[in-house]
Amino acid sequence: MKIYTTRLTGAAWILVTLFWATGNLLWAMPQQTVSGTVTDAQKNPIPGVSIRLLHRNTGTQTDLQGAFSLSATPTDTLSISYLGFKTLRLPVGNQTNFTIVLQQDITDLGEVTINAGYYNTTRREQTGSIARVTGEEIERQPVTNPLTALQGRMAGVNITQTTGVPGGGFDIQIRGTNSIGAGNDPLYIVDGVPFSGNSLGVASNNARVIPGTISPLNALSPSDIASIEILKDADATAIYGSRGANGVVLITTKKGKGGKTSLSLNMQTGIAEVAQFVDLMDTSQYLEMRREAYANDEITTYPSNAFDVNGTWEDNPDTDWQEKLLGNQAQFQEVNLRLNTGSAQTRFLIGANLRTENTVFEGNSDYTKASALSAMNHQSADDRFAVNLSLNYVSEDNVLPLSDLTSQTRIPPNSPKVYTEDGSLNWAGNTWGNPYAAILNESYRYQSNNLIANATFSYALTKALSFKANLGYNQIEMEDKRLFPSTRYNPAANRDSRYSVVYSNTASRDSWIVEPQLTYENRWKKLDIALLAGATVQQQQEEQFYVSAQGFPSNQVLDNLASATTTTILDNGSSQYRYQAFFGRVNLNWDKRYLLNLTGRRDGSSRFGTGNRFANFGAAGLAWIFTEEAFFKNQNVLSFGKLRASYGITGNDQIGNYEYLDAYTLSGRSYGDLNGLAPAQLFNPNFSWETNKKLELALETGFLNNRIYITAALFRNRSSNQLVGIPQPGTTGFTSLRANLNAEVENRGFELELRSVNLESKDLRWVTTFNFSLLKNELLSYPGLENSTNANLLVIGESLNLVQLYELQGVNPETGIYEFRDFNGDGSISFTEDRKYIRSYDPKYFGGLGNEISYKNWNLSFLFQFVGQDKNGLITNIPGAMINQPVAVLDRWQQPGDEATYQRYTTGRNSAALTAYNRFVNSSGNFVDASFVRLKNAYLSYRIPTVSKVITNTRVFLQGQNLLTFTAFEGADPESGFSTNLPPLRQFSLGLQVQF
């Protein structure tokens, strides 16, 4: 089944047609034209400055020459704002031309508009907790997934990269894990369009090379992103109701700037490599271990299949399999082209991006991502009507080895050569499974197409009241395959293409959303009021077809499943999700010092039972800007102070569709000529939402004219009404029923953010940022836990991400066998009673320290990321078996009286040593400190002085990712901690930016 190129659907064409049909309706009221230029103190033009009419939902931006033009009345006031500069407010009066000079400001309080979803706010006036990363920060990193660009930059947001393979996944947690049985992913919104964070892939199809699930955010191009805001507390997330429990990620793509037509070209090329390998045994150490293991097991004659020590293989080869399989340098290239044009009323952006890269693996690999972005923003001459259109299309094509070759790096170092002298694969007399047979023949292929279309229309009904409609459409199509050609077998097996197997998964997701909204903004004396009321209607349709095929006439036709003699449909289904809601907001601002923000939402979802399909969510946020009080006016130390608090309830609907219904599945048996059905789940009409009650208290302070700005926040989130498996009597035919339980999970923590301007002069500027997070996850209650399906997984008072371990007490100096603590004192060690040493995979703390230094035309920025955590150790196979080991296990017991870290070697024939090893793998001895400090990113650029009228800006840059890591962890990478997955790669790139 082929995957077809995504087309501009009827819905998208309707959006475009609506613009052309309505774009000129309200231009009939001529107004005074106000124009001007905006520069910095050095008279350099500033493009992209926001010029807005105060208390009106209209405005424009400066072009590349810093010029602007818009219609206004003499009673209007211009609000001029730009990141890093102080906001100006200028009355229009009878003036029609302005020459505006902005002064730098070390904070963006009140200057920069922050996207809060359904409304905008500023740092000064926000009552909730919102973290923000700009497109400029993202562009400084050579990444393919926007989540990579957020690591270490946001308090309370912990992101882990699970693999260094292109197209791999990420784990993201915003203030901890809330749910026991439902999802913990945040809600993603791209340009107002919900973007599902669930992969369409089948985990079994990609798991061997991409652990977990394929991140759908790979279908976004980081170069197209203008900003990413993350909403964390109840005040910020409650307006998203049932979908806001785990936080909200708002992604805004770039828009046109208008003015003189400009063309921007950004090119970079780079390399990537594994930063660190595990210190493994060489051949002499390995053979010593193997021979000692046989001696310990009292085996004097080596078995016939012990090819590494019985003389079949030579003793002198010393292959470093890490270097051989993972030691290549990956290469990547990226080209980005953007065209900006338009006028004061209508602005266009057209962009395209192409990135290609491969991996460090041996064999063939190729990852290509191509994207196209178009945006149009229009305002009528009287500024009453506005329309914004955007189309974002991304295509991915990924070819990888079928398995992550990191799992093959423990092959014995004295194994045979890969190739014979004639260049064919060496099977060494059928004594080993040559890994290159799979590397050169098996493959994993992934293709996807993603379209996001958005249109917003707004009309000012009066000066205070405006109507807005947000329309969105998202379509994703994907196909991935696992190919097992018969050429992967040893020729001695005499297997032809009849033994070739292909697994193919094809899936699609179509989603649309309509959101009409009314906004009222006005001012009465000292009171500013903003009201919002709106509704949401959304539908999402998914289809999937998963099939296996074997028995091909030739390996050349593996892509044609129709040529197989046997095909088996593994999954063929479709599902539909429908959602509707009403939402509102009341924001009161008294005298710019007392702020109240109330948000609410009533949600209805097709995922829940008929008796609980609707629910209400809401929050209240309060803020007091206490430095506006008279008693703070006569001092120069504390320049800004705000105390804010919020409390509210959000929900979680991250469960599968139809889980409240009776369901049936194929039984695998037939009756006559018909396939039989068997019950799969029971009907539960009371199936309902999980709820998350969020509480936060925060203090924001600025010192010395805000040169030092600190935000400290305490939060506590309690998630209840958990969706878990409730035990059922055996007479029902089921062991459990998915239902709501009054179990409660708490996440509490502390967040600290600091920003300081250390130096600032005409030519030199040095800014430091710092963030730090402490987080504690705890299961507060779980009625009937001891009899539930989670009895061996959860513990009251501990984290949901706990691990229950044996407690290692050392190696017995007489026997050389590991010993463990007998917790219940019954004289024996058991799985159920003695795994009471509890630790957690949750990070103890995490954060980042960044610096940006600008001197004339030079710019240097770098970020250190740090995480305090524990991970599983490196011992995954028994020392003494036919597999290589870390050199650390050389510190082992050899004779009575020895004090050693590791027990005696064994081939597995010593039952006591084997049992002790199996316990050791799941013990405190193999759960280690994996804390680290990493130079996550560094960026150095130089702006070449412009001498051409054609070329307006030229910049060359160097950038690096994952450059240095300081850690006591002995594995390849402490971030993921996995010993069988490719770690995140160290990357270097050289680039050029040119603007015409």
Image (cartoon, grey):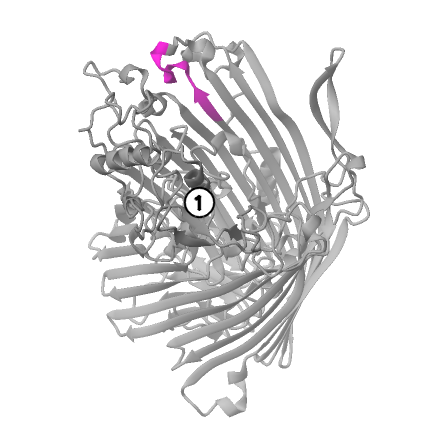
Q: Residue 754, position in %: x, y? A: 41, 71
Which stretch did the figure color magenta? 481-492
Query: Looking at the image, is 854 positioned above or below residue 319?
Result: below
Q: Residue 873, position in %: x, y? A: 39, 48
Query: In the figure, is residue 220 to the left or right of 834?
Result: left
> For the image shown, how many numbered marks are present on the structure?
1
The quarter holding residue 715 reads: bottom right
Query: In the figure, is residue 26 to the left or right of 848?
Result: right
Q: Give me the residue at 26% from left, 60% from top.
A: 860
Asked if residue 485 lies in the magenta stretch, the reply is yes
Q: Quadrant of the N terminus?
A: top right
Asked if residue 452 lies in the magenta stretch, the reply is no
Query: Looking at the image, is 564 positioned above or below residue 913?
Result: above
Query: Looking at the image, is 625 positioned above or below residue 990?
Result: below
Using the rendered image of the protein, determine whether residue 406 is visible from the camera's viewpoint: yes
Using the rendered image of the protein, determine whether residue 521 is visible from the camera's viewpoint: no
Query: In the figure, is residue 276 to the left or right of 38?
Result: left
Mark 1 surroundings within 10 Å by alpha-carbon count, few (fewer than 14), some (14 through 19), many (20 or more): many
Q: Nearer the viewer, residue 227 or 292?
A: 292
Q: Residue 981, position in %: x, y? A: 39, 40
Q: Residue 536, position in %: x, y? A: 69, 50
Q: Nearer the viewer, residue 383 or 201?
A: 201
Mark 1, residue position: 921
